[in-house]
Amino acid sequence: MSAGDPAGAPRAALRALLAGQSVVFPASVFDPLSLQLAAEAGFEMAMLAGSIAALVLLGAPDLVLIEAGELAALAQRIASAAPLPLFVDGDHGYGNALNVMRTTERLEAAGVAGFSIEDTELPAPPGAAAPRFLSREAASDKIRAACAARRDPALVIAGRSGVLPVLGIEEAIARGAAFREAGADLLFFTGVKPRAEVEALAAALPPPLMLGGLVPELDDPAFLARSGVRVALRGHAPYLAALAAARRTYHALREGGALPERLSADELALLSEEPLWRERARHFLARP
């Protein structure tokens, strides 16, 4: 990717965060303006979760109902809103290892700074009462395929595993090692709860590590940083808060009563960069 590509700076910034000594808590975002708000608040990076993408695109639960192209299109709109690294949940890559290669191409072209590919068997097979997982070898092949399809070496590829609560810490460590060998830049684990599990991962796997679904016991920046965790997710409160605010507003408009707090016209104009666009209009649309 050329130095002039707008994705270059965010990808370099994400690489620098992963190479650092601190843990970062990404802002969960869902559209271009939410990324602008995250940047305004001072977040170092943002994340588009698969569950949030499904809600935004389809109003549907996280059952892998969206397609790779839909995810990439949403990611592209968000990533272009601000020079903040956007990390995307790439689910299972939307198929086998060859599909993962196409998903990689699409997300890279969308300008994201990084994405993850997980080892869950998706969509869930009929009658599955609990998550099922690909074999360690098949999951590693997906990571290897993603790395082979990557054109920009600065793009971060994460191998994600949720096996720990089901198959145990030893299998989680073995998968982490296999993903790293396959070329993963970042190891992403979900379902981690007691500190002992984080310590076991840290003892066996070099940083950078990423944790999803952070429980209160683990929400300790100093501990996470010492353990090689460089990214930790605190959930997706912004989108849920936005829905709650919209619900209250709709009810107030329909039934009467005071409207909830909302952005002023001036605040919205600044957030949406209206002055910049008006200046462009004066420059490029001056002639009839």
Image (cartoon, rainbow, N blue to C red):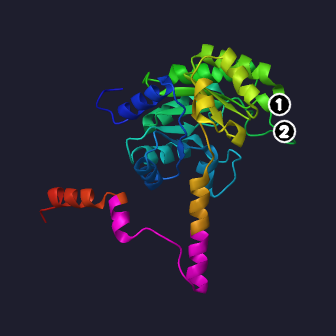
Q: Residue furthest bottom?
A: 256
- Report the amino acid beneath label 1: Val
- Report the amino acid beneath label 2: Ala
Q: Residue furthest left?
A: 287
Q: In the image, is 235 to the left or to the right of 280?
A: right
Q: Mark 2 points at which residue?
A: 130
Q: Position of residue 61 (x, y in %)?
A: 70, 52
Numbered label attached to residue 42: none
Q: How crowded is mark 2: few (under 14 residues within 10 Å), some or many (20 or more)?
A: few
Q: How much space separates mark 2 and mark 1, taking CA atoms?
A: 9 Å
Q: In the image, is 224 to the left or to the right of 192?
A: left
Q: Do the residues labelled 2 and 1 touch (CB within 8 Å)?
A: yes
Which residue is painted at 73% across and 30% down in the image? 195
Count of numbered labels shown in the rendering? 2
Q: In the image, is 100 to the left or to the right of 191?
A: left
Quadrant for residue 224, please give it: top right
Q: Quadrant of the N terminus?
A: top left
Q: What element carries label 2?
A: loop
Numbered label attached to residue 166: 1
Q: Quadrant of the C terminus?
A: bottom left
Tell me if residue 205 can be seen: yes
Q: Residue furthest front?
A: 222
Instruction: Tell me the mark number nearer the camera, choosing from 2 and 1.
Output: 1
Which residue is painted at 80% across and 36% down in the image? 131
Q: Does the magenta stretch include residue 72?
A: no
Residue closest to the eye, 288 or 220: 220
The segment highlighted magenta reads: 246-270
Which residue is painted at 36% across and 31% down in the image? 8
Q: Position of residue 286 (x, y in %)?
A: 13, 62
Quadrant for residue 64, please give it: top right
Q: Position of residue 198 (x, y in %)?
A: 70, 27
Name the chief secondary structure element in magenta: helix
